[in-house]
Amino acid sequence: TNNVVRGCDISSNIFAGVLLRSNSFGNRVTANEFDGANTYQDQAIRILNGDRNVVSNNRMYGNGYGVYVDGTARSNLILRNAIYSNNNSGVYITSPASRNRIISNVFEGKSGYQNEGVYVSSSHGNTIQGNFTRDHGGDGIFLTSSDTNWVVGNLIMSNNGDGVEVDWGNGFNRIDGNTIRGGMGWQDRGVYFYYARSNVVTNNIIERHSSS
């Protein structure tokens, strides 16, 4: 609790470069460089059951995942990181993690891989705001079986999949004030819903997509 990890060069880890697990509260992971092992499962940073941690101003590349958030992790802040060339998602949040904030990060994909900028699965109350996500093999932002999330003010462009995709019974997600530019991929739609209900899409700029 209340530890600081700063200014480290962390490389070639098979699992997590930094692991914040049960009863990890109020830690800061900032201004580090993570050079991954280039597998599908390694993570630069994993937050497992930790609350109110801050991950900021790090550079993460060549990992399976940039930041992986799971367990009961709540109210964590992922801020102003550069996350690129990962085999899977830049940030991955899964149940029952909730109420995390992903703000002002840069996500750049890796050619030839089915990766997303942000992937949220069975999680609620998260905020994805002011990020730049581009050049992913999959979607810019993907929500599945998740509700009451905010996707606000992001610049999403040149992804092979959809700009924002919302799947499977999701409710009350808000997609507001984003700029979503197409990548002309085979499955390239601005905002796409699949068996999803009661979501709100307002004030977005959506342009240059190959599908409707």
Image (cartoon, rainbow, N blue to C red):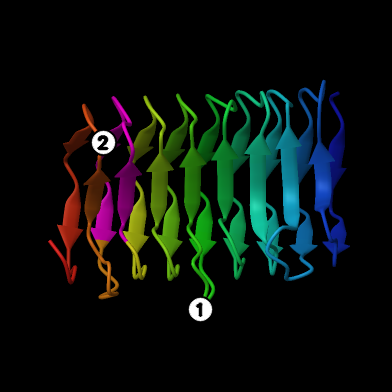
Question: Tag on residue 160?
Answer: none
Left or right side of 135 for 21: right
> Foreground: 198 or 134?
198
In the rendered image, residue 167 lying in the magenta stretch gets the answer yes
Circle 1 SS class: loop
Instruction: Estimate the spatial distance between the alpha carbons at disc 1 and disc 2, rounded to whole Å.
Output: 29 Å
Q: On screen, 169 above or below 133?
A: above
Left or right side of 62 for 164: left
User: What residue sits right under mark 2 in the picture?
Assistant: 196
**Mark 1 surroundings within 10 Å by alpha-carbon count, few (fewer than 14), some (14 through 19), many (20 or more):** some
Question: Tag on residue 111?
Answer: 1
Image quarter where the C terminus lies is bottom left
User: Residue 85 appears at what percent x and percent y?
Assistant: 60, 70
Circle 2 SS class: loop
- Which residue lies at the image location 42% right of the left edge and 64% below the top edge? 138
User: Residue 127 appears at what percent x and percent y?
Assistant: 44, 33
Q: Which amino acid type is marked by label 2?
A: Ala
**Mark 2 surroundings within 10 Å by alpha-carbon count, few (fewer than 14), some (14 through 19), many (20 or more):** many
Left or right side of 117 for 196: left
Q: On screen, 78 above or below 11?
A: above
Mark 1 against mark 2, which lies toward the viewer? 2
Q: Which amino acid type is marked by label 1?
A: Ser
Q: Which of marks 1 and 2 is nearer the N terminus?
A: 1
> Foreground: 106 or 61?
61
Contact (Cβ within 8 Å) of mark 1 with mark 2 = no
- Which residue lies at the image location 36% right of the left edge and 49% below the top edge? 154
| Figure label count | 2
Question: Magenta segment, which residues?
Answer: 162-180
User: Residue 149 appears at what percent x and percent y?
Assistant: 39, 30
User: Residue 194 appears at what percent x and percent y?
Assistant: 26, 45
In the rendered image, residue 204 lying in the magenta stretch gets the answer no
